[in-house]
Amino acid sequence: MAADLPPALRQRLLKKGIIDTPPSPSSCPNAVNPYHECTDYCRQRYGGGVASKPTATAPKLPKQNEAPEAVMLLPQDWLQVRDDKTNHFYFWNKKTNEVSWYPPAKTTYQPKQTLAEEQRKRLSRKSGPSSFKKKKKKFTEDTDLDPMDPAAYSDAPRGTWQSGLEDKGEAKTGVDTTANGPLFQMRPYPSPGAILKMNKDIKS
Amino acid sequence: MSYMLPHLHNGWQVDQAILAEEERVVVIRFGHDWDPTCMQMDEILYKITEKVKNFVAIYLVDITEVPDFNKMYELYDPCTVMFFYRNKHIMIDLGTGNNNKINWALDDEQEMIDIVETVYRGASKGRGLVVSPKDYSTKYRY
């Protein structure tokens, strides 16, 4: 009866709990995943469910029983172990207890320089002056900090293109207030009328 | 004694008070009446008012009530005294490094009279910067 229902309706009824969920096929390879819920496709493909067809056969798992060739290239302390549930091989580090489905990178491996390469290097070092012409002059990027910039050697924050520009409504007497005596110069403040006018201009 | 001196209550009044004086120096005290430093300065200003009334007009401005000039005049100190003559700010070299204003309270009437007289004499000759008769660069030391 439940098999005749259209799939959308069945999903809704399943959600409400009006009809029972068909048992998941035992051969579904996703059964080991605790978050997996077998769908119609699983039942159809791997059989065992209500909607299964008689022609549907158990899937052909890839032949994993034999250890792949990668075992020969494994780094130290890594072993290839077979998972009973999925019949796949995984990799296990017996020292750190790490596990991985993928073969671990071989970190200890270091390629040896071939003799020919070494020779070529030595030659290029000898012919230094000739290759000098080919070198292009490197331009410093805009992001590089000028060593004379106060930001380079002190706590001063790095300025932007507009920092230090004249700001309207700020007193322009900001000369070095630490200078004293004849070195000290200060411009007078504008008159109150000028300030009121400026404030009005800034507001509008 | 700040209630003995005329207050200016908005920016326009400050402007007009300065513009209205043609032959007198305008001394404006920026600060708060309740401030101890201002109280001390107001006392000095009040005492000299009568003596210098021929060439000086003194006004008080509350910088909270009239915040228009706080930014441009850099009014960060509790008490600031500035001098104006014919709508022009007159600087005075007090030896403190700040020629624009007196930002502490004087404690002697005669010193204040000397300062305003120097300002008046210099300003009426067209000077924008006058040198104070007394050097106040050591005021914190003694």
Image (cartoon, helix red, strand yellow):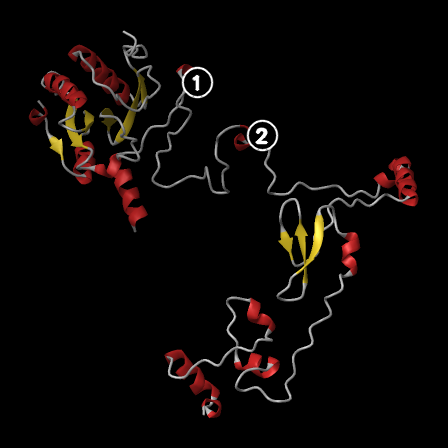
Q: Which chain's residue wears label 1?
A: A
Q: Amino acid at mark 2?
A: Met
Q: Quadrant of the N terminus of chain B?
A: top left
Tag 2 secondary structure: loop
Q: Nearer the viewer, mark 2 or mark 1?
A: 2
Asked if badge 2 and badge 1 are on a common chain, one would say: yes
Q: Residue at the spot x=69%, y=76% of the render?
A: A60
Q: Which mark is residue A54?
A: none
Residue B141 picture quarter: top left
- Lateral position of residue B10 relative to residue B135, left or right: left
**Classed neighbour count for the residue bearing mark 2: other residues with Cα under 10 Å, few (<14), some (14–19), many (≥20):** few
Residue A158 pos. (x, y %): 50, 37
User: To which chain does the residue with label 2 belong?
Assistant: A
User: Would you place residue A135 above or below residue B119 in this image?
Assistant: below
Q: Residue at x 28, y 19 (%)?
A: B122
Q: Nearer the viewer, residue A27 or A204?
A: A27
Apparent side of residue B89 relative to residue A117 in the rendered image (left or right)? left
Q: x%, y% of residue A37?
A: 50, 73
Q: x, y percentage for residue A186?
A: 38, 25
Which quadrant holds residue A41?
bottom right
* Mark pair 2, 1: CA separation: 24 Å
Say what amino acid the circle numbered 1 marks: Leu
Which numbered circle lies on residue A183? 1
Q: Which residue is mark 2?
A: A148
> Mark 1 falls on what kind of element?
helix
